[in-house]
Image (cartoon, rainbow, N blue to C red):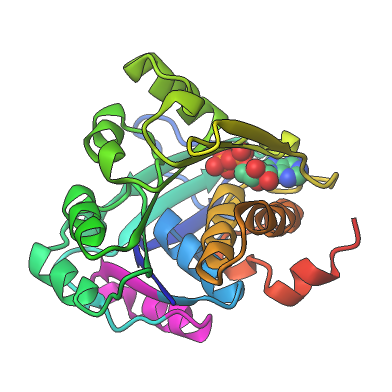
């Protein structure tokens, strides 16, 4: 089966600076690096590394060819990534000597997707394929409606959190993935605890604690502890978790087995510095002896 991931593609531009610049200040960076990021791209790479067939539905600007090439190298199907007359989404990340950061995020092409583009991509989908999306693009509701009408599994990682966006797609979802903060925000907005949401499967990730799965068919909730590791950089842990989870489900794994694999992949991810470029592959996950 195939995962169609409607998702953001960002250039993460890291600048090492002696201190975070103040108003009116011009400051020379002491080091620079560029990485592939964006929640969507991270999840596509994770799904591909987990051996799923993943079609990324997204957009870059003319300055984003390298990001598309990198996604292709990582095994993602990039035929439905279009090039628009916009800047590629990017994050300008200044990091000072103490590790404190300041970030400017520009969504650019990620928020300029058209319904025609989305429809062309989803026209390839078949019954039982997965539609995955997050909150860093436009066209989420349109995508979820089309996917649901085509009999796809509709999965949403509700980040960055936006209560109205979540509420508008809730009735269309088969699976919702939230972190603990997002689950609390959703409960504040709807009055509903995760186990009371009208979604068949809700997975709440709990950082070093692992995650909790709520299944409304059985009415059961189950905890999955995370392996104990020394965290170095937790960026992309949630995206790795979600990509692996969906790849497992897409391959027909029962939820507990897909969660166990996702939790192991995310634990490895927190021991690595970086985002999409360092997401572990299936062999790393199988070799993890914890
Ligand atoms: P997000 O990164 O989206 O905020 P979490 O912090 O809940 O989400 O992390 C997502 C998943 O990554 C967790 O469910 C867990 O499996 C894994 N994870 C995060 N932090 C750690 C950690 N310190 N040790 C082991 N696993 C972790």
Task: Say if 70 sits above or below 111 in the image.
Answer: below
For image coordinates 54% across by 62% down, the residue present is 249
Residue 286 horizontal side relative to residue 99, left or right: right
Q: On the rendered image, what quadrant is the N terminus found in?
A: bottom left
Residue 286 horizontal side relative to residue 153, left or right: right
Residue 103 horizontal side relative to residue 29, left or right: left
| Outermost front residue | 218
The question of residue 75 being in magenta is answered with yes
Q: Position of residue 117 (x, y in %)?
A: 14, 71
Give the quarter of the image for residue 257: bottom right
Res 18 seen here? no
Q: On the rendered image, what quadrant is the C terminus found in?
A: bottom right
- The residue nearer to you, when weighing 20 against 259, is 259
Task: Say if 184 sits above or below 268 in the image.
Answer: above
For image coordinates 33% across by 18% down, the residue present is 190
Quarter of the render that holds ligand 1? top right
Residue 58 horizontal side relative to residue 269, left or right: left
Q: Position of residue 48 (x, y in %)?
A: 53, 75
Q: Position of residue 35 (x, y in %)?
A: 51, 65
The question of residue 267 being in magenta is answered with no
Give the quarter of the image for residue 3: bottom left
| Outermost right residue | 289
Which residues are drawn in magenta?
55-76
For image coordinates 39% across by 48% down, the residue present is 174
Q: Position of residue 200 (x, y in %)?
A: 44, 41
Res 262 seen here? yes
Q: How many marks?
A: 0
């Amino acid at each position: 089966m195939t995962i169609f991931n409607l998702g953001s593609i960002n250039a993460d531009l890291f600048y090492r600076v002696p201190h975070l610049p103040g108003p009116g200040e011009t400051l020379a960076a002491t080091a620079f690096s560029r990485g592939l990021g964006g929640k969507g791209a991270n999840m596509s790479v994770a799904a591909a590394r987990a051996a799923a067939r993943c079609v990324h539905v997204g957009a870059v600007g003319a300055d984003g060819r390298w990001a598309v090439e990198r996604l292709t190298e990582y095994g993602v199907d990039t035929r439905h990534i279009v090039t628009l007359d916009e800047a590629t989404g990017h994050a300008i990340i200044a990091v000072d000597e103490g590790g404190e950061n300041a970030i400017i995020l520009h969504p650019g092409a990620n928020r300029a997707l058209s319904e025609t583009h989305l429809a062309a991509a989803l026209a390839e989908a078949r019954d039982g394929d997965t539609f995955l999306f997050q909150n860093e693009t436009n066209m989420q509701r349109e995508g979820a409606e089309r996917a649901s009408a085509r009999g796809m599994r509709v999965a949403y990682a509700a980040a960055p959190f936006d209560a109205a966006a979540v509420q508008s797609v809730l009735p269309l979802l088969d699976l919702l993935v939230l972190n603990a903060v997002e689950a609390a925000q959703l409960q504040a907005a709807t009055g509903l605890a995760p186990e009371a949401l009208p979604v068949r499967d809700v997975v709440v990730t709990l950082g070093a604690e692992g995650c909790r799965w709520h299944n409304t068919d059985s009415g059961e909730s189950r905890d999955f502890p995370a392996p104990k590791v020394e965290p170095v950089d937790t960026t992309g842990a949630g995206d790795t978790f979600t990509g692996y989870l969906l790849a497992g489900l897409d391959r027909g794994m029962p939820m507990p087995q897909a969660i166990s694999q996702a939790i192991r992949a995310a634990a490895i991810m927190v021991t690595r510095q970086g985002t999409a470029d360092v997401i572990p592959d299936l062999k790393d996950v199988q070799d993890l002896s914890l």
